[in-house]
Amino acid sequence: MDKKKISELIAQLSLEEKASLCSGHDFWHTKEIERLEIPAVMMCDGPHGLRKQVGEGDHLGINVSIETTCYPTAAALAASFDRKVMEKLGTALGRECQAENVAMLLGPGLNMKRSPLCGRNFEYFSEDPYLAGEMGVAYIQSLQAEGISACVKHFAANNQETARMSGSSQMDERTLQEIYLPAFEAAVKKGGTRSVMCAYNAINGIFAAENKELLTDTLRERWGYDGFVVTDWGAVKDRVKGLVAGLDLEMPGGIGVQDDQIVAAVKDGTLDEAVLNKAVTHMLEFVADYQEQRKPETSIDRAANSILSADLAAQCAVLLKNTDNTLPLKEEENIVFIGEFAQRPRYQGAGSSHINVTHAIGALEAAVGKNVTYAQGYDVHSEENDAGLLDEAVNAAKKAEKVVVFAGLPDSFETEGCDRDTLAIPDNQNNLISAVAAVNPNTIIVLHGGAAMELPWLDEVKSVLCVYLGGENIGTATVKLLYGETNPSGKLAETWPIKLADNPSYLNFPGENGIVDYAEGIFIGYRYYDKKQMEVLFPFGYGLSYTSFSYSDLHLDKEAIQDTDILMVNCKIKNTGSVAGREAVQLYVRDEISSVRRPVRELKGFEKVELEPGEEKTITFPLDKRSFAYYETAIHDWFVESGKFFVEIGASSRDIRLSAEVEVTGTIELPMHYTKQSTVGDLMKTAKGRKFMENMMAKRQRHSSEAAADSAQNMGEGSEKMVQKMMIEMPLGALVTYGSMTFEQLDDLLKMLNS
Ligand code: GLC
């Protein structure tokens, strides 16, 4: 199908045929129109493996799918802080899709981790929109370079599983635009995603599947998106309203009742056929793109992909604790692996992303040939203590030099479709860990799970390595990390709070009667914990290494910039330890003084750098307007408020190593409409207002300098501050009451200011 001939094709399609193209043929295919040689194409889940079903389709991972490779899930991948990890994944997945003739992969998931309880957090990258956006862009670009469409999801504000198909995420404009949309915005503007999947839920009462503000005004008009929009499976509400709002394709297909509604709406004049033609154009462009980039000869090497999965997982794991350098293990040490996850690791999540794996490799299998014994320790399908298993594990621990307990969240604790109700891991695992640590001080914990967990035994153990959900070959990666063949280099892409009640959404999760109040606003994740100066278990961006790094020589190429400039930031990182390692260097921006509430600092850059012992490298970060801006609702856009900013380089959000000031001048004046209720402080926000105030103050100064001198003498401590504050908050109308001006002068002033 020639993309340039799509308008001719549309002219040849009947109304019924056009309507039929706006829904799928079945669970996974678009419709074909044989007489015009329009083929059906296939789309499948994602995001961290190809879930292709050739038989009965489903969207919950219940029916079988073909055997493919399962890679680390998003929660793990984000912890790599490495765009190259995402690029390798996207390339491998793109080739698998070509080999299996799948035109689109449903991923990546770009929803923010608002609460650590969300059941699908394992499929999402972070609590930070910049990190999530950058990782998503790298995945999209490499996947699409293989001729396969990405499909970023779930657009937007799908941050929980509870009532996901009926609930409404309620938030103010700034919160939506500054936290919940930017990762999607990056996916469109920087990633060039060819498809967007709208979420099940509503945003401020309007379902995503028929939300024009979201699907057209924001997505297409403001961001310039020219791909197509597909529903989440079963998300459509009113098909015609959806089309008008910007929804192109309804999935799953195969029923077609909604197609008839489209035909009827065009016939009775309630739907402009041009709207239908636009949706059909988007669909046909998607099919034509795939035909153009089809590489049927692509073959895949499953064994190589399984090794790749292990290599990627090894870059994601986060070393959370390592007292007395208990890790890495030595080959000669007598080790016991305890816990069913050592044999049968939890390496992916349940639901639509569930990959049918030929063979998952656990740490025990990967450790064959090493000085390692095993004890099951617990039954992963139960939360009850098993006395026999516990005794066996404690006895084994007594005999070993070091103990590695494999623990974390079972499938029953976190899954698509329902949210967690606790941050705890199963009690029988907690009891096992304490019992083992009581008899062997050299106890190490390997954690599997898709999001933050509570670790009540943290002070009882020497080391903790979090491998998240690390894909089918997590065992190989874990053994390499435990024995130091690979140096852990992951850093947390989400804050781990000390307890569930500390988290910012706690009072408003999962909402009531389907209404979810995002009352914490922009203050999610570290933005919240930092602002509240709260202790956390592990901060955003935190992760240890078997080596150490020094940070130095922070240099900004300008001391002062306008918000239209690019600021180049350089710094040096040196490996000051004795083994090679990688460091995820983070750049944060802090707005020292702001007229609006802002987080203490925000991530605006990161680079993963690999260093041999003693090696030093310079890293460069370009900062642009969005590095300093906040979303200003008065102009419905991003805005930089002039003032002093700090550029900070950190090993984590709470381990800032370098800092430098930069003066930034905003080039946009906020539109102000002044009234008698506007305050003197409001006047100071515009040049005209400032000029007027300066003149007025100068005049007052000349007439009453003596009186001012006396009153200054009489005023007590702090009165000056009180007068200043009262002045700033003085409504302009009160200036007349206090005799500073007449009503006529005030009217003239308002006319001048609003002209
Ligand atoms: C599911 C998920 C979505 C998935 C789709 C198809 O309900 O929400 O992520 O891609 O349906 O399985």
Image: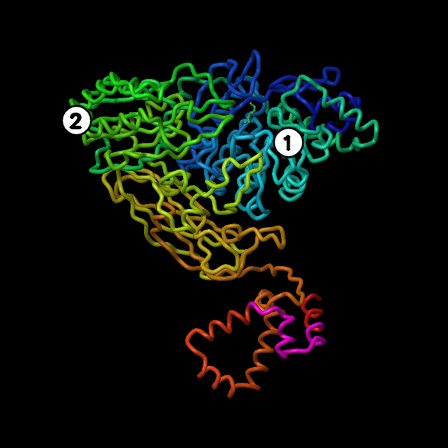
| Residue placed furthest toward the front | 513
* Residue at image coords 59%, 36%: 168
Task: Say whether residue 701 is left or right of residue 425.
Answer: right
- On the image, the x and y values in percent for residue 502 come to 40, 42
Q: Which quarter of the picture shows residue 273?
A: top right
Is residue 528 rendered to the left or right of residue 518? left
**How far apart are the alpha carbons under marks 1 and 2?**
57 Å
Q: On the rendered structure, is 731 left or right of 618?
A: right
Give 51 or 540, whichever is nearer the viewer: 540
Amino acid type at circle 1 is: Val
Indicate how the structure is coloured in the image. rainbow
Tally the numbered discs. Answer: 2
1 vs 2, front mark? 2
In the rendered structure, find residue 229 and report the number of the disc placed on it.
1
Report which residue position mark 2 lands on: 401
Q: Secondary structure at mark 2?
A: loop
Closer to the camera, 118 or 193? 118
The percent position of residue 477, horizontal first and vertical second, equals 33, 26
Would residue 158 be counted in the magenta stretch?
no
User: Can residue 670 be seen here?
Assistant: yes
| Residue type marked 2 | Glu
| Whether residue 703 is situated above or below residue 202 in the rendered picture | below
The residue segment tinted magenta is 729-747
Ligand 1 in which quarter: top right
Relative vertical location of residue 683 with respect to residue 217 in this rendering, above or below: below
- Residue at image x 35%, y 20%? 380
Question: Between 186 and 326, which is closer to the camera in this rendering?
Answer: 326
Secondary structure at numbered mark 1? strand
Task: Choose the circle earlier in sequence order: 1 or 2.
Answer: 1
